[in-house]
Amino acid sequence: MSSTISPRLLARARSQLCDVTTQHASIEMLASEAEMSTFQFIRRFHAMFGETPHQMRIRVRLEAAKRLLVLDRESVTGACMAVGFSSVGSFSHLFAQRYGEAPSAYRRRLLAIPGWSPTLLMPHCVSLMNAALAAAAGLQFSRSMVAPSDAQSGGVPAAPARRIRQE
C-alpha cells in the first residue's frame, strides 16, 4: 500500500460511486483500487467528502430516483430498480426517512403544484448562477415560478411538517 494517498484516487472512487447507470463497485473493490485498506479508504473518503462512501452512494441513488419519479414519471418500482436498489421496501423506507414522505407521495405532491416545471427541481445555487449569467448577457431573468419561501430549499416546496431532513 502506498504511504501517500492521492486525492485523485479518492476522486475516481467518488465518481464511480456517483454513477448510478453502471454496475456498482463494492467498497472493498474501490478501496483496493485506491490502494488503501477498506477502513482507511472509508475514513479518508469521509474526511475528504464529508460522508462515507455508503452514505454518498445512497444519497446519489435517492436523488436520481427523485428525478426519475417526477421528470420521467417512472413507477416507484421502476425508479427503485433503475438506481440500483433491489428491494422496493428498503428503497421506500430510505426515501421516506431522508425526504419525509413516500416516493409516490413525493411525486403526487410535486406534480400537483400549479404551473409545475422541471426547473423546480433545480438547486437554488444553479438558478442563481443562471440569473447571474443571464444578467451578464443582458437578458431578463425571473424567479417568479419559485416562491421566496421555496428558494431556500432549492426551489422545491418543502414537504409537510413531518419532513425529517432537508438536503
Image (cartoon, rainbow, N blue to C red):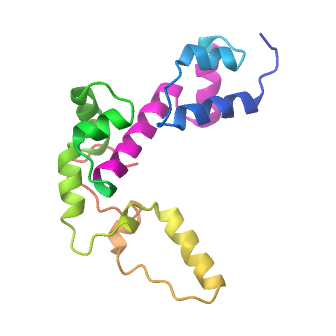
- Depth order, front residue of 161/85: 85
Q: Specify start and end residues of the magenta stretch as a single range.
A: 40-69
Residue drawn at (53%, 71%) of the image: 128
Left or right, 35 with respect to 95, comes to right
Left or right, 101 with respect to 10, comes to left
State whether residue 106 is above or below residue 127. Answer: above
Is residue 60 part of the magenta span, yes or no? yes
- Depth order, front residue of 125/73: 73
Is residue 29 part of the magenta span, yes or no? no
Residue drawn at (63%, 17%) of the image: 31
On the image, the x and y values in percent for residue 162 come to 19, 47
On the image, the x and y values in percent for residue 39 come to 59, 13
State whether residue 162 is above or below residue 41. Answer: below
The quadrant holding residue 98 is top left
On the image, the x and y values in percent for residue 58 come to 42, 32
State whether residue 102 is above or below residue 85. Answer: below
On the image, the x and y values in percent for residue 130 come to 55, 73
Residue drawn at (34%, 61%) of the image: 156
Residue drawn at (53%, 22%) of the image: 25
- Depth order, front residue of 166/106: 106
The quadrant holding residue 93 is top left
